[in-house]
Every structure is written in structure tokens, then in C-alpha cells.
Amino acid sequence: MRFPLKLVPDDTNIPFLRYRNVAMAFSLLLIIGSLALVAIKGFNLGIDFVGGQMLRVQFAQPVPIEQIREKVDALGLGEATIQQFGSPRDVSIRMPLPPGGEEGANRAASQVRQAVSQAFPGARFDAVETVSGKVSEELFRTGAWALGLAMLGISLYIWFRFEWQFGVGALFALFHDVALTLGFFALTQLEFDLNIVAAILTIIGYSLNDTIVVYDRIRENMRKYRKMDMAALLDLSVNETLSRTVVTSLSLGLTLGILLALGPDIIFGFTAAMFLGIVIGTFSSVYVSAAILLWLRVSSDSFVPKSGTPANAERMGTAERVPGK
């Protein structure tokens, strides 16, 4: 007889909340460090946000950046930013917008293509992107609004769906996930463009989904075990949803890990942001979103109807799987 594989046993009883102070201190340090990196180093903004022209070149063999810079600077098209991305043979050349509008941009791209191809035979230009300054400012503004409104709308939904403490907890967990992701891009200086904004919005959705599952189980157990210690009840709820959390995160992590190793370079930043977000989101769902309810003084009668108490709501928290019993 075959039995299904279970990554998390049914009787799992891990005392997550025992380490809540250490986990929260670690999270706060990471948040502060991430915000400091963003303030000091900033982002390597793509042309989506700063405007300009970018050419992606693949060389037949690795070429020193200084040699490429020398050829591009000799054209007199302005200060160019030249960086490797992906393999040592892949290089991005980013330049300010030349005068003359679209015609001037096409002429400048042709000059760069001709100069680089002559100096480095076998060079292949994979993409040429041009974004005006006005469009880039609009994209940056709308991207920031999208992130802010998504987090605000989510917290308001959870506030009305549960209690205000749950809304605050979810908002802090989402802020934790977004701040750490932004800190990662400030540290690594990977290109930050609209693809990364899309990745962060996806991370917010994933983290929210996992957090709501945990919160819903907490609310259910608060109605069932009115006299259970809150820390024990939170541990019980997290353990009961742990199997789903692990299976979902592991499935996504394996897929994103393969994309990181074997996927195309053009989506490397997006994939890296998603992979990091899955790890951070899982951590925040277990340690941050649940633990913060204790500090916000969520009580066992938060979901008891004001008009009366259901007959089955007076169960004692003496179930076999109560953590720490």
C-alpha cells in the first residue's frame, strides 16, 4: 500500500513564537540596513525610469569594459554607462538621449553599432531601447503609486476582514518584504526597471496570500479555544498551515531556482527578485505577521460576538497538538 509523501508531518509542533523576539530583532536590523543601502547607494535605475538609450551587446569572447568605453566615448554622444550582465560576454551600453528626437536616437544607435562591430568582430546587438525623459518620469511615478496603493489597499481589506491589529500586522509584513527586496537591489546594483516593479507587486500578492491563510486559521482557533494562551494558539495555527506554506514555497522556489541558473539573462533581475521574495515572504508569514499580533494585544475574545457566546466556543485549549503542553 502506498502512502502520499508528506513534507510536514501532521503532528508537527514547532514553537515558532518562542523565538519571536530574536526573529523580530533580526527583521528590524535587515529593514534598517536595507533602507540605509537605498539611501546611500540608491538603485541602478534602468532607462524605464531615467530615460535614455540602452543597447545590449553579446561579444564573441569576453572584452574588457574599458576597451568598449574607449570606443563609445570617442563618438562624442555623451557619458555612457557600460556594465556586464549575465555572462562576461554580455554587456549593456546605456547613453543619454541625443538631440533630434527619434531620428537622432536612431542615428546615435547606428553609430555605436558600427563602431563596436568594427572594433570587436562577431559582436551581436540583441536589443536597442529608447525611452524619453518625460515617459520615464511618468513610469517612475506610476510605479511608486502602484506599490503604495497595493500595500494600502491590502491592509485596509485585512482590517475590515479581521481586526485592525491584523491589518497593521499584514502591512508591516508587506513593508518588511518590500524593504528587504529593495535593499537587495541597492546592494547588488542589479538594474531596477519596470520588470522589478512587477516582481515586487507579485511578491506582495504572494506574501499576502500566505499571511491571510495563517490569519484565517488564527481567527478560527481563537473562536474554538477561548482560554488557550495566545502564544500557544498562534503556534498551533502556524503549525496547522505549515504544510501548505512549505509545499507552495518549495514548488515556487524550485521553479525560480532553475530559471536563475538556466533562464535568459534578460529576466535575471525579475527572477532574482521573485526568488528572494518567496524566501522573505515565507519568513514574514511565519515569524513577523503572527508574532506582531502579540505585541498589538490581540485577545482571545476578539472574535466573540457582542450579543452572546456560541455554545461551542468555550472549549479549553487542551487539544493534543497544543504547543508546549
Image: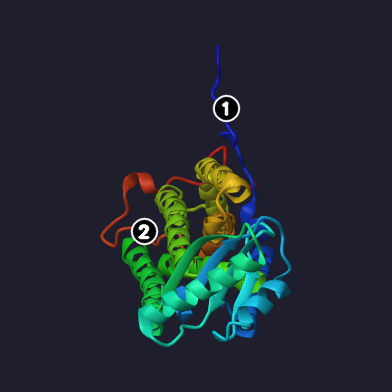
Residue located at (41% from left, 60% from top): 301
Compare residues 311 and 252 and report the one nearer the observer.
252
**Quarter containing the C terminus:** top right
Disc sitting over residue 270 in the figure: none
As helix, strand or loop, the secondary structure at mark 2 comes to loop
Name the amino acid, label 1: Leu
Residue corresponding to mark 2: 303
Residue located at (55% from left, 51% from top): 264
Residue 300 locus on image (x, y percent): 45, 59
Whichever of callouts 1 and 2 sits on the residue coming sooner in the sequence is 1
Q: Nearer the viewer, mark 1 or mark 2?
A: 1
How crowded pointer 1 is (Cα within 10 Å; few <14, some 14-19, many 20+) is rated as few
Residue corresponding to mark 1: 5
Q: Is residue 297 in sight in this rendering?
A: no
How crowded pointer 2 is (Cα within 10 Å; few <14, some 14-19, many 20+) is rated as some
Residue located at (31% from left, 49% from top): 310
Does 294 sit above or below residue 316? below
Extreme-top residue of the structure: 1
Name the amino acid, label 2: Phe
Compare residues 53 and 181 and report the one nearer the observer.
53
As helix, strand or loop, the secondary structure at mark 1 comes to loop
**Quarter containing the N terminus:** top right
How far separated are the C-alphas under marks 1 and 2? 36 Å
